Image (tube, rainbow, N blue to C red):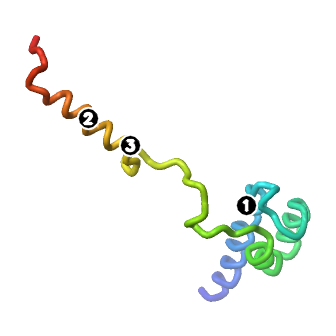
Amino acid sequence: MLRVLMFLVPLALSVYAFIDCISTKDDEIRHMPKPLWAILVLLFPLVGSISWLIAGKKRVPAAERPRQWVAPDDNPDFLKSLDEDKRKDDDPKREES
């Protein structure tokens, strides 16, 4: 089991680092161009992956990141619109057909 982990952990780390590297925007990469980082991660899986994770990408704290898309059930505006729709449906002044 330990032999398998010694193979799978570096493999998973290098796959993650490679995908992260190629999906990162060019303006967020530090120190070297993106193709050079990708080659480093592929040729030296353990060292290249750790180097990429530590020094290759600009890391921004979560509080400073721009807000991204929010799922409808977490979006306060969407939930408010649901409440307004429900009030309109429950309005006793509404004409019955």
Q: Are marks 3 and 2 in contact (CB under 8 Å)?
A: no
Give amino acid for label 2.
Glu
Q: State which quadrant residue 54 falls in.
A: bottom right
Q: Nearer the viewer, residue 65 or 51?
A: 65
Left or right: 72, with 8 as reference point: left
Residue farthest to the bottom?
2
Q: Position of residue 26 (x, y in %)?
A: 82, 56
How far apart, in angstroms, are the residues tagged by discs 2 and 1? 43 Å
Q: Which mark is residue 88?
A: none
Residue count near mark 2 (Cα–Cα under 10 Å), binned few <14, some 14–19, many ≥20: few
How far apart, in angstroms, are the residues tagged by discs 3 and 2? 11 Å
Residue count near mark 3 (Cα–Cα under 10 Å), binned few <14, some 14–19, many ≥20: few
Give amino acid for label 3.
Asp
Q: State which quadrant residue 32 falls in.
A: bottom right
Does residue 22 lie above or below 90 as drawn? below
- Which mark lies nearer to you, 1 or 3? 3
Residue under the image location 55 percent in, 51 percent down? 68
- Give the secondary structure at mark 2: helix
Does residue 53 lie above or below 24 as drawn? below
Does residue 87 lie above or below 72 as drawn? above
Residue under the image location 13 percent in, 27 percent down? 91
The residue identified by callout 2 is: 84
Image quarter where the C terminus lies is top left
Count of residue discs: 3
The residue identified by callout 1 is: 19
Q: Position of residue 28 (x, y in %)?
A: 77, 61
The residue identified by callout 3 is: 77
Left or right: 72, with 34 as reference point: left
